[in-house]
Image (tube, grey):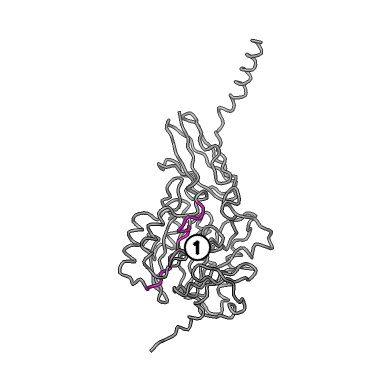
Amino acid sequence: MVIRRFVAAFAVVLVSAPAFAQDTTVRIKNFMFMPMAVTIHAGETVKWENLDEEPHTVTSETGLFRSGGIDGGGTFRFTFARPGVYKYTCSIHPQMIGTITVK
Amino acid sequence: MHHESPTRRGALKCLAYGSAGTAFALSGGVFTTFDVADAKTQSAKPLFVQVSDSHIGFNKDANPDVAGTFRHAVDLINALPAGPAFVMHTGDITHLSKPEEFDTAAEIMKGLRVSEIHTVPGEHDTIDATGQGYFERYGAASGGKGYYSFDSGGVHFVALVNVLNFKQGGLGALGADQLAWLAADLAGRAASEPIVVFAHMPLWTIYAPWGWGTGDADQAMAHLRRFGSVTVLNGHIHQIVQKVEGNITFHTARATAYPQPAAGMAAGPGPLTVPHDQLASMIGVTSVTSVRHPHGITLDDRTLA
């Protein structure tokens, strides 16, 4: 039993280790950022994928990041250097909101 | 001596054509049907024609040829029995604010046989938040502000911008500076002067979850309410929605690019893909012949079908 648990925990480390190096993905679908709230560590990158036919933008409240128009099928990446709570919106569909929390 | 305006008979009717050529008269906010043949024979010169949402640059299934349908709309306007004094494009001229999209749109609009073309920006025309591409081409009339007014045919026209400075999670916005300008622009005008207001996003809340409204539109309406005849014409939602509130008539135009779902009838307000042979009946232009209350406004929504 103890051994089995150890193996399971080890397996999780093996699986999550490569994922740690990957970008965190936020999908844009049906005029929503999904997930709306994401938590990452300083130095990590968020990738936004626009799955709608409609263009969207990823525009931070403070102007720190601004994607410009991301057409349907397009992506945008931003690397967050410093801890903080970063609110953003789609500048052309202001009902769309999201938050990146950087620890 | 009393002069009866030659367009008075035409002005007694407010026309809104459906895709099948149905016509409705709007009088005092009540719709009644009337003879379509009678409506078709009226050849009064339109005050102006509104086009909207050409979305040049869009290339998905809902309309793979938005330049073609925009050209078709231009042909429809040029074929009117009497040419309008001007054409107003109520925004989303382009899809992604790209220079080549603005160039294509300008080239197509050159084909309009009218002496004046007016515009207001849509949020797709200012996708970079500064609207540089739009203002380089269309900002001169307003000193780079985007909002301005002009007079034509005894009517005062006001062009407003409600696609800049969106509040997070909110609707479109006019902003304090523009509202102050509007108050000054309207001050001192006789209440009998007909007013037509253009803006891209609806100046009343049609559906907040999809952002179909303007957060501070009520403040604009407060300045407009004293006038005897106010017509508010918007685009953005790619379908006709109309409302009458006192002396103010609100009307949204069809797009020339593609339709959108009715409010709340889809997961989101994106392009609505319909069978290709139905597309032309769901896009079009709005021809406006009269905007004088109490006889009502005369709107003729023509599809490309």
Residue B84: say if magenta.
no
Does B40 appear above or below B173?
A: below
| Chain letter of the residue carrying label 1 | B
Does B173 appear above or below B137?
A: above
What range of the chain is rendered magenta? B192-207
Between A7 and B167, the one lying in front of the other is B167
Residue B227 drawn at (x, y percent): 38, 68
Residue drawn at the location 44% of the way across and 74% of the way down? B294
Quadrant in the picture for the N terminus of chain B: bottom left
Q: Amino acid at mark 1?
A: Lys
- Is A7 left or right of B263, judged from the image as shown? right
Residue lying farthest to the top in this orientation:
A2
- Secondary structure under tag 1 reads strand
Residue drawn at the location 47% of the way across and 66% of the way down? B249
Q: Is residue B97 visible?
A: no
Residue A89 drawn at (x, y percent): 47, 44
Residue drawn at the location 46% of the way across and 31% of the way down? A102
Q: Is residue B220 visible?
A: yes
- Is A58 left or right of B75, judged from the image as shown? left
Residue B206: say if magenta.
yes
Does B41 appear above or below B249?
A: below
Residue lying farthest to the bottom in this orientation:
B1
Residue B13 drawn at (x, y percent): 52, 75
Please, what is the dominant secondary structure of the magenta stretch? loop
- Is A17 left or right of A78, judged from the image as shown? right
Q: What residue is shown with label 1?
A: B243
Between B4 and B163, the one lying in front of the other is B4
